[in-house]
């Protein structure tokens, strides 16, 4: 509407010949040009990324090959690849590579599950009941200030070299991330929405189910990205501190054998696993939060 | 009475225990409300407020910002209790949220993660209706407010006026005998506000709940209401109560403003309201402690 008025206002007095030309032709060219620019930029970014990766890997390889840095300490890309091939073909010292990955993943996933569940339940509870929050608040802050990764040593002493100690460490690390977000999410719930469903006849539990949880879900899901990283850290560190199998043990063994290629290879595997999990969580996020208005970055075609 | 709703072909019969002739009397007598400030001092928002809304009457409350209008509504709704005095609805003292109450807030109060249909169906669902039944009634109400075809949209996909219609349907679907409205059209542009006011009157005339309508817009109050309560600024008290004798149905609210009788009434109430507005304005210049009470 405003476009039409402004065009007539401008077109009538002076520049009728220029603006009076059929617009469709011009707009098609402009759109094509814009699309071309977007494509070109995407290609440029992709090529630059590949160049950065190649620069780092080739530089690493050459520097170690020319003995400018010692491959004994820094490893070598080709060494990492061959170590990976060994693991895939012959297995690690503790069984096949896949079973090591599975053990670590199982610990991380179980720790993630328990940590997230406890974090949501306690976060929502404390967010809802002001009194409990006031009483327990300082204690939670104190526990949060403790370097919890050290708890791993105690858990190994308590629970032995099995899965349980790693699951517990991962769960403790995950818990605090999720807890604080759930708590904050509950506190941020719009009081008008709560008043509205109460007027409509909601019981306390229905208020939680229909308003508090969906509203806090945005916050909780945002914390899951970080939380899964912590779950993997918990599992790996737990295995590092004492285990009979798992990727953390593989890393610890490589370290003891002065085998940097082995450490890097295990790191790479963990990174791939973490990225896969991250994309699964993003998928979940899109599913659960589909109701949200599209953000500006999404509209921008990123 | 003309209370029996017309055009409720698909609406199920009224649930037992609620009278079909909607509209319950609202009585406030000597209502005082104090809040504790975070610093620990008491702040009086309402002081000895008494007035009545007859069954099926449309009552508007006008007053400057910070006079405790919204606090009055929360007392009537049962969301909060008075520090002294009593509120009665339908003859019974308000003790918690009563089933026959509807509330329309200044913001739409629609759940952004539910569709329009889900939002409107929430009322019957929370009152124990089955999902099918609740959704059928929600569809009927969406048709009545002119939102057929938008059932599956989310609130953020609607315009401001459409969101208002949806929340109006959500507030009316439980067929309340009392409808409380807290500046419901305050954030709308002038044209949309006029359209919504007309639709509100149309829907109200179908089911005739008693309405308590908060506004700071005197013209809106006179155009809509049978009774206008003028409140003084902090602590809020009732300054005067005016009965509006404009005939019903009133027709378009945009046009009634030019009737001579409307102008007379407006002149009379404005005389009373003007002092309060200027006093409230002078206060906000010096101290802004009272303004929070209106939220």
Image: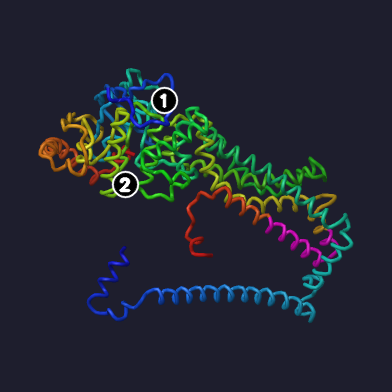
Relative image position of residue B270 (x, y in whole percent):
14, 38
Q: Dot 1, crowdedness within 10 Å: few (<14), some or many (≥20)?
A: some
- Indicate the quadrant where residue B58 lies: top left
Between residue A51 and residue B31, name the one nearer to us: A51
Chain letter behind tag 2: B
Which is more toward the observer, A256 or A203? A203
Residue B26 lies in the magenta stretch: no
Q: Are marks 1 and 2 on the same chain?
A: yes
Residue A62: numbered disc: none
Tell me which colouring the rendered structure shows: rainbow
Give me the residue at 81% from left, 53% from top: A246
State which region is magenta.
A253-276
The chain containing the residue under callout 1 comes to B
Q: Confirm whether residue B75 shows in the render.
A: yes
* Image coordinates for residue B222, horizontal then vertical, percent: 19, 36
Write down the residue under mark 2: B187
| Secondary structure character of the magenta stretch overall | helix
Q: Is residue A254 above or below residue B116?
A: below
| Residue occupying image coordinates x 74% and y 75% | A60
Q: SS at mark 1?
A: loop
Q: Residue at x 40, y 73 (%)?
A: A24
Structural distance between the alpha carbons of marks 1 and 2: 28 Å
Residue B175 located left or right of residue A112 = left
Residue B229 seen: no
The mark nearer the N terminus, 1 or 2, is 1
Residue B235 place in picture, x, y as percent: 25, 32
Q: Tell me the quarter of the image containing the N terminus of chain A.
A: bottom left
Q: Name the residue beneath numbered marker 1.
A: B99
Query: Is the residue under label 2 in contact with that under label 1 (CB below 8 Å)?
Result: no
Q: Quadrant of the C terminus of chain A?
A: bottom right
| Magenta residue check for A270 | yes
Displayed quadrant of residue B286: top left
């Amino acid at each position: 509407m405003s476009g039409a008025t402004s065009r007539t206002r401008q077109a009538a007095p002076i520049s009728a010949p220029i603006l009076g030309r059929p617009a469709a032709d011009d707009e098609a060219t402009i759109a094509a040009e814009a699309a071309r620019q977007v494509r070109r930029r995407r290609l440029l970014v992709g090529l630059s990324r590949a160049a950065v990766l190649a620069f780092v890997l080739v530089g690493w390889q050459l520097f170690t090959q020319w003995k400018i840095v010692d491959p004994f300490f820094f490893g070598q890309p080709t060494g990492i690849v061959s170590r990976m091939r060994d693991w895939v073909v012959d297995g690690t010292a503790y069984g096949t590579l896949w079973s090591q990955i599975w053990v670590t993943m199982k610990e991380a996933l179980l720790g993630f599950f328990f940590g997230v569940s406890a974090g949501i339940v306690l976060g929502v509870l404390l967010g809802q009941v002001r009194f409990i929050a006031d009483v327990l608040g300082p204690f939670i802050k104190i526990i949060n200030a403790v370097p919890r990764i050290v708890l791993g040593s105690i858990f190994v002493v308590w629970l032995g070299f099995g899965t349980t100690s790693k699951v517990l460490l991962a769960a403790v690390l995950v818990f605090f991330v999720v807890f604080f977000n759930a708590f904050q999410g509950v506190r941020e719930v719009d009081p008008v929405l709560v008043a509205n469903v109460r007027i409509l006849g909601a019981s306390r539990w229905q208020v939680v189910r229909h308003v508090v949880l969906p509203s806090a879900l945005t916050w909780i899901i945002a914390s899951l990205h970080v939380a899964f990283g912590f779950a993997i850290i918990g599992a790996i560190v737990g295995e590092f501190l004492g285990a009979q199998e798992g990727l953390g043990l593989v890393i610890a063994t490589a370290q003891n054998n002065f085998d940097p290629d082995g450490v890097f290879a295990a790191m790479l595997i963990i990174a791939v696993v973490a990225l896969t999990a991250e994309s699964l969580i993003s998928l979940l996020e899109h599913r659960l939060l589909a109701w949200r208005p599209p953000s500006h970055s999404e509209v921008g075609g990123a | 009475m003309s209370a029996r709703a017309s055009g409720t072909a698909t609406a199920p019969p009224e649930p037992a225990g609620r009278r079909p002739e909607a509209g319950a009397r609202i009585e406030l007598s000597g209502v005082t409300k104090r809040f504790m400030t975070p610093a620990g001092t008491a702040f009086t928002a309402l002081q000895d407020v008494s007035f009545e809304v007859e069954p099926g009457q449309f009552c508007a409350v006008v007053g400057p910002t910070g006079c405790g209008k919204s606090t009055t509504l929360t007392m009537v709704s049962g969301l909060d209790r008075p520090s002294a005095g009593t509120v009665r609805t339908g003859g019974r003292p308000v003790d918690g949220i009563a089933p026959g109450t509807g509330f329309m807030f200044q913001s739409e109060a629609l759940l952004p993660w539910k569709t329009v249909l889900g939002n409107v169906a929430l009322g019957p669902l929370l009152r124990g209706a089955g999902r099918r039944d609740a959704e059928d009634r929600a569809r009927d109400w969406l048709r009545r407010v002119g939102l057929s075809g938008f059932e599956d949209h989310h609130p953020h996909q609607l315009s401001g006026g459409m969101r208002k219609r949806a929340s109006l349907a959500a507030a009316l679907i439980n067929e309340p005998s009392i409808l409380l409205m807290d500046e419901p059209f305050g954030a709308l542009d002038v044209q949309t506000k006029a359209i919504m006011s007309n639709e509100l009157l149309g829907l109200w005339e179908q089911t005739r709940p008693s309405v308590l309508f908060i506004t700071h817009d005197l013209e809106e109050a006179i155009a809509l209401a049978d009774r206008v309560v003028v409140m003084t600024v902090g602590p809020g008290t009732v300054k005067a109560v005016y009965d509006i004798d404009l005939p019903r149905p009133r027709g378009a609210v945009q046009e009634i403003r030019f009737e001579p009788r409307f102008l007379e009434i407006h002149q009379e109430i404005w005389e009373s309201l003007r002092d309060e507005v200027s006093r409230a304005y002078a206060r906000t210049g010096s101290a802004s402690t009272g303004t929070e009470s209106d939220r």
